[in-house]
Image: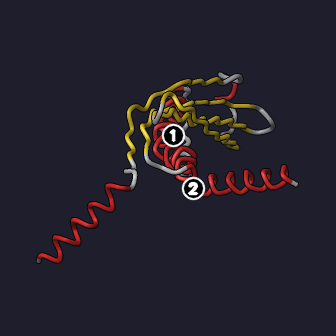
Amino acid sequence: MADEQQNNATANGAQSNQPQVQFNLQRIYVKDLSFESPKAPAVFQSQWNPQVNLDLNTRHTELQDGIHEVVLSLSVTVINGEQDVTFIAEVQQAGIFAINGLDEAGMRHTLGAFCPNILFPYAREAIDNLVLRGSFPPLMLAPVNFDALFAQSEQRRVAEAAEAEA
């Protein structure tokens, strides 16, 4: 019993020397929202055979020490038939995150993958709401693997850095 207490005290002491990771979601909000249907109302009279193109992007800025804004941008362009743009729906879903105690690689991963994973369901809901209000069927965008996208981005970043050195 005394050994357990000593081991716990040693473990607690070792933990206090390491910086403690803190992550706190402070706010989620829509930064920008847009919908246009350039061929309405004629588009409602044609056969519905959509081709959906999704453009996705993230960016982040440090607002102050340990406080970051992450913005997930989704742009959906739907074409029906022969090159006719049926509608374009765009959203910039943003969040403010308090993040401390991470090394550089951990911070890049958190800002580039973890935070966008949190924001995506809100952005997807905003897009579906816009599309429904435009009198089109909901898109129900598939989940996105931000960890895989981040890994690809990191590979490109490392390759470009190596290329710049050469």
Report helix, strand or loop for mark 2. helix
Q: Which image quadrant: the C terminus?
A: bottom right
Left or right? Give the position of 82 relative to 133. right
Q: Residue furthest left?
A: 1
Residue at x 80% of width, y 36% of height: 83
Amino acid carrying label 1: it is Arg
Task: Give coordinates of residue 17: x percent, y percent.
Answer: 36, 55
Q: Which image quadrant: the N terminus?
A: bottom left
Kindly identify which numbered label has been placed on residue 69: none
Q: For this rendering, which residue is in front, 91 or 67?
A: 67
Task: Name above or below for residue 131 compared with residue 113.
Answer: above
From the image, state whether disc 1 or disc 2 is nearer to you: 2
Q: How many marks?
A: 2
Could you tell which of marks 1 and 2 lies nearer the N-terminus? 1
Q: For this rendering, which residue is in front, 155 or 122?
A: 155
Report helix, strand or loop for mark 1. helix
Residue at x 68% of width, y 39% of height: 47
Q: Is residue 50 visible?
A: no
On the image, numbered disc 1 is attached to which residue? 124
Task: Give coordinates of residue 37: x percent, y percent.
Answer: 66, 24
Residue at x 46% of width, y 38% of height: 122
Task: Give coordinates of residue 2: x percent, y percent.
Answer: 12, 75
Task: Give coordinates of residue 59: x percent, y percent.
Answer: 61, 36
Residue at x 56% of width, y 24% of height: 32
**Distance in Å between CA atoms under marks 1 and 2:** 18 Å
Left or right? Give the position of 45 relative to 142. right
Left or right? Give the position of 92 relative to 39. left
Q: Is residue 18 visible?
A: yes
Q: For this rendering, which residue is in front, 115 or 17?
A: 17
Question: Disc 1 vs disc 2: Cβ atoms closer than 8 Å?
Answer: no
Amino acid carrying label 2: it is Asp
On the image, numbered disc 2 is attached to which residue? 147
